[in-house]
Amino acid sequence: MGAWVVVAVFAAVVVLGFAVASLRIIKEYERGVAFRLGRLRGPLGPGVAVVLPGVDKLVRVDLRTVTLTIPPQEVITRDNVTARVNAVVLFRVTDPTKSVMAVENFAVATSQISQTTLRSVVGRADLDTLLAHRADLNEDLAASIAKQTEPWGIRVEVVEIKDVEIPEMMQRAMAREAEAERERRAKVISAHGELQASTELRDAAITLSESPASLQLRYLQTLLELGADQNSTVVFPIPMDIVRPFLEGGYRTGDSGGSGDAVSHIRRVRSDD
């Protein structure tokens, strides 16, 4: 009787141990792909799953987003410029069964596909596109990688080019080009400013010529501005009434004998006075 009790207790302990060993806890962000005697059982979890030791095999699959860094790749752009480009890929598993059944190691496979696609896409673009239109290249990379990883149950969320390294000689050439472009824009802006200033001065001259009093006030304002600072400038103001006869006489005379006519005009002005 005592032997049967020992056997029963031993059997109960074995069954309890077997039951405890058959329990697996699958986290909320995980799924378990189980195989029973080599045949697929399907995804399990989250929670407690029963996996028979020696009969079932459980493969855990993480459903969280994975950050994959692509190491620097030596690429040649379409305009034959050598560059080193690295990128980052964010992806996650959407179908645990496919990620286990369709590919041996989905993380390694995604990394290799990302490296190959990066070299291919960058090689079809020129250097200016690589530097200035990086968003378009990111979208092209994401679409190309997602097309190849979709049969594995992998969804590519983000692909971003992180850094672009170009030869030092090319950097100096680009710096000279940027400097020349800035000088060109500065000259164009200065020329536009001169054109606008000349237009405004022409309009101001027309306005002042229509009102002699305004011209006289402008003349007095100029004298006031000259005398505002403490300087050694000596100004001899000459009324326009004195200078006008000489100007009008010079305009009426021709090229020959102009000086004699001006002298005779001055004498007539003095005799009139």
Image: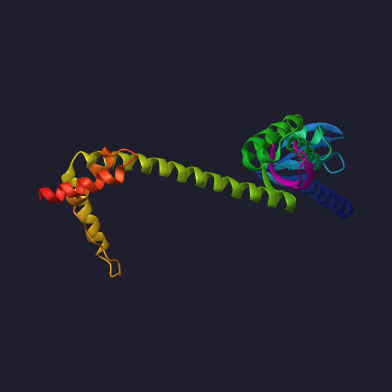
Indicate the position of residue 197 as horizontal and vertical percent values. 37, 44
Q: Position of residue 214 (x, y in %)?
A: 18, 46
Between 1 and 225, the one lying in front of the other is: 225
Residue depicted at x 66% and y 40%: 128
Q: Is residue 153 visible?
A: no
**What count of labels does the image hold?**
0
Left or right placement of residue 7 versus residue 29 in this view: right
Q: Residue at x 82, y 52 (%)?
A: 9
The image quadrant that residue 108 belongs to is top right
For the residue pair 57 and 114, the one nearer the viewer reads as 114
- Nearer to us in this view, 32 or 237: 237
What stretch of residues is rendered in magenta?
Answer: 69-93
**Residue at the spot 55% in from the left edge and 44% down from the top edge:** 184
Task: Please identify the residue farthest to the right as the structure is shown.
Answer: 3
Q: Residue furthest left?
A: 273
Task: Return the x and y of residue 8 as percentages of the image width and height.
Answer: 84, 49
- Is residue 76 in the magenta section? yes
Is-magenta flag for residue 230?
no
- Picture quadrant of residue 104: top right
Q: How is the image coloured?
A: rainbow
Q: Taken as a whole, is the magenta stretch helix, strand or loop?
A: strand
Q: Seen in the image, is 147 located left or right of residue 254?
A: right
Is 231 positioned to the left or the right of 156 in the image?
Answer: left
Q: Is residue 232 left or right of residue 190?
A: left
Whether residue 143 is visible, yes or no, is: yes
